[in-house]
Image: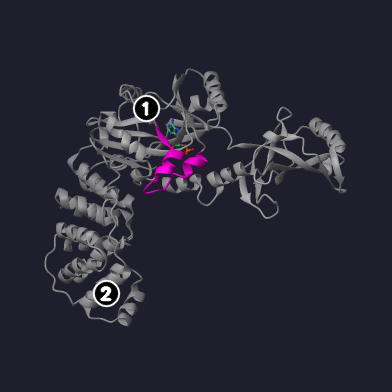
Amino acid sequence: MLEFARAGSAVAATSATLEKTRTLGAYFRTLDDDDLRRAAVYMSGRAFPPSQRRTLGLGWSTLSKVVSSVSRRDEDELGRIFRKHSDLGDWAGEALDGSTLPAPVTLGEIEATLEAIRTARGNAKAAPLEAMVRRLDAESARFFIKIISGEMRIGLSEGLVEAAIAEAFGVPITQVKRVHLVTGDIGETAVRCKRGEFEAGTVTLFQPVRFMLASPVETPGEAFTRMGAGTVWTEEKYDGVRCQLHRQASRIELFSRDLKETTGAFPELVDAAPAIGHDVLFDGEVLAHRDGRVLRFFELQRRLGRKKVEEDLRRDVPVVLVIFDLLWLDGRTLIDEPLTTRRKLLEGLGLEHPFLLARLEEATDPEHLDRIFKETRERGNEGLMVKDPLSPYTPGRRGLAWLKLKRPLATLDVVVTAVEWGHGKRRGVLSDYTFAVRDTGSGKLVNVGKAYSGLTDAEIAEFTRRFLEMTTEDQGYRRMVRPEVVLEVAFDSIQHSARHLSGFALRFPRIVRIRDDKPVDEIDTLERVAELYDRYFGEKSEVALSEVAET
Ligand code: AMP
């Protein structure tokens, strides 16, 4: 531990990143595999590798009691020392200086202590902590407490730890990063780089692999140009939540897009996994699915974030896993194999409900791709994934091997309830349209916005004639009209709004189509607006969560 602390201090002492990586690299070189694994994790400010999903559960009060008891300093004094540093480790280092009986401590013993603290309950956590602190010199205690507090604060990012691993073992930094993406564990990365084990970045079951991501494209033509492939594969872009399933014999674990374990949320997948008959690591999308139909995301939302799922919810909103990739099969890592191979193996598994395969189609040119894209949208899907059939699976990367072709967020079919005279160029015509959706609760129409754009002059002239005839109340600048004209509007986002009775307002709405083919009783509902709001713009929206997860 003393060597660890000395290396940490030396890293802290310089602000030059090159010097930091050199110092840390030199320290890493002195360690055997086990200590290297530990040191790399601890230097990144973690008590446990993230893949173990463990937390210490140690609070400030236990820590300060222990430091107070060992140092025989009272609260005021400890508070004064803390204010000097504003860092738990530095505080403990100074507070404990001179009051311990230092003895050599190995990183293995540190690990055992952290584990003992983790598994002890409540007040019992103090005993292993105190026993260790009593054996540490001030510098080691300083670093031990830094590990416990989850922050090193010595100017060392995970990127610099990667650089130090590269430096220590003469491995290109890109290679280190690649191994790290696969293992998701800096300790394991260090050991593999030391041993030179880069081959097909082996996946370890039950250690979540970072998900491969897709880059957005606007048009089928752009998809072909960016991918630079003669033939592309397309898959439906399913609107659910990303999920990785690891299965070995009777052990099954699921992970979400941010690599959190979500096994408890989807018991039907866990129950069905033993029937797969192979040990596997699947990448796919969980969807709510009942009687052969995909349910809306709104329904799936009820299933998310749960540790346990009650029977009736499971019955109301059953889920399936639509699988689109196979990363590991019966001991064999497949991420460096082309997608064609992975898909073939996947198809060979003979999967059954609730495991489905993503719908795959090949496109040979942009026109073909455009046709598939249109069909997919007609089926009500969010968009299309375009994949290079020869590409490997690149964990954590948003490259050009996977592209996503999306339609604009969503449109709503609304009815015009009031119209206003325009200004400037639009003077003399009724060009501003207030529109509403239906509140199914009350049966009433409630306004959600006002659109000014999207129509041609000829259309506006025609509408002016129509609205003059449909006027139910002339308020001068504005006319209330019979709610008969249905429009399809696109928009950028939805906000809560006190201005409208509906409680919502669409931002930047634009008219994309006049829906004379659509009767007013088929327009969209307030419920749908609320659902889109929750899904995409609310505080707890999926979009917001995934943005966080990707960083
Ligand atoms: P986005 O969230 O817009 O970045 O789109 C990427 C997400 O689409 C992935 O993280 C998956 O959750 C989801 N997705 C749906 N269908 C597929 C598919 N066939 N292949 C890959 N990702 C998919």
- Give the image location of residue 447, x and y in percent: 71, 46
Name the amino acid type tagged 2.
Lys
Which label was assigned to residue 391?
1
User: From this viewpoint, which residue is outermost toward the left?
Assistant: 103
**Relative depth, front residue between 292 and 361:** 292
**Relative depth, front residue between 78 and 275:** 275
Q: Earlier in the sequence, mark 1 or mark 2?
A: 2
Type of colouring: one colour
Question: Residue 358 falls in which quadrant of the image?
Answer: top left
- Residue 225 vertical placement versus 432 (above, below): above
- Residue 546 vertical placement versus 202 (above, below): below
The Cα atoms of the two marked residues, 1 and 2, are separated by 56 Å
- Give the image location of residue 35, x and y in percent: 17, 53
Q: Under tag 2, what secondary structure?
A: helix
Tell me what residue is drawn at x 26 percent, y 45 percent: 166
- Give the image location of residue 343, x and y in percent: 35, 24
Q: Is residue 399 magenta?
A: no
Q: Which residue is mark 2?
A: 65
Whether residue 421 appears in this view of the structure is no
- Give the magenta part as a residue range: 297-321
